[in-house]
Image (spheres, rainbow, N blue to C red):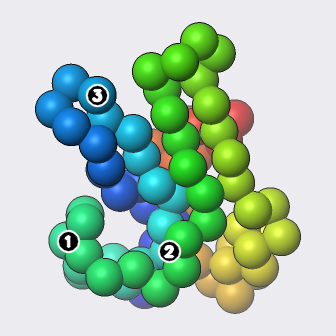
Amino acid sequence: MVKIKLSQTGKRNRKTYRIVVMEEGKRRDGKTIELLGFYNPLVKPPQLTINQDRLKYWISVGAQKTDGVTKILK
């Protein structure tokens, strides 16, 4: 099953995240199918950049969003 997940980047205590599409069983920072966007919670207000067209495409073909991604997108 394909999932839309968060992948961590950055240093310790300065984490930023990538919103990626990957297989369910892969590691958090493993090989991705596609990069959809970025999320930076360290700035005020948190910065979110995402490709809406590709997100809608992946959801339409059956990709599931994880809880973290769902929370960020609201």
> Pointer 3: what residue?
14
Name the residue: 63% across, 82% down. Answer: 62
Mark 1 or 2, nearer chain start: 2
71 in relation to 51, above or below: above
Say which element carries label 1.
Answer: loop
Q: Residue at x 25, y 63 (%)?
A: 28
Q: Picture coordinates of residue 39 (x, y %)?
A: 53, 41
Secondary element at image label 2: strand
Residue beneath the point at 55% across and 50% down:
38
Circle nearer the viewer, 3 or 1:
3
Looking at the image, which is closer to me, 9 or 52? 9
For numbered disc 3, what is the local secondary structure? strand
Give percent across and percent down for residue 70. Answer: 58, 46
> Tag 3: Cα neighbours inside 10 Å, few (<14), some, or many (≥20)?
few
Closer to the chain start, of discs 3 and 1, is: 3
What is the spatial separation of the Cα atoms under label 3 and label 2, in whole angstroms?
23 Å
Neighbour class for label 2 at 10 Å: few (<14), some, many (≥20)? many
Of marks 3 and 2, the one in the foreground? 3
Q: Which residue is mark 1?
A: 27
Q: Which residue is mark 2?
A: 21
Q: Amino acid at mark 1?
A: Arg
Q: Which residue is located at x 64 percent, y 15 percent?
A: 45
Q: Amino acid at mark 2?
A: Val
**Where on the picture, by quarter, is residue 60?**
bottom right
Q: CA distance from mark 3 to mark 1?
A: 21 Å
Crowding around mark 1 (Cα neighbors within 10 Å: few <14, some 14 to 19, many 20+) is: few
Give how far apart the Cα atoms at labels 1 and 2 are. 12 Å
Q: Earlier in the sequence, mark 3 or mark 2?
A: 3
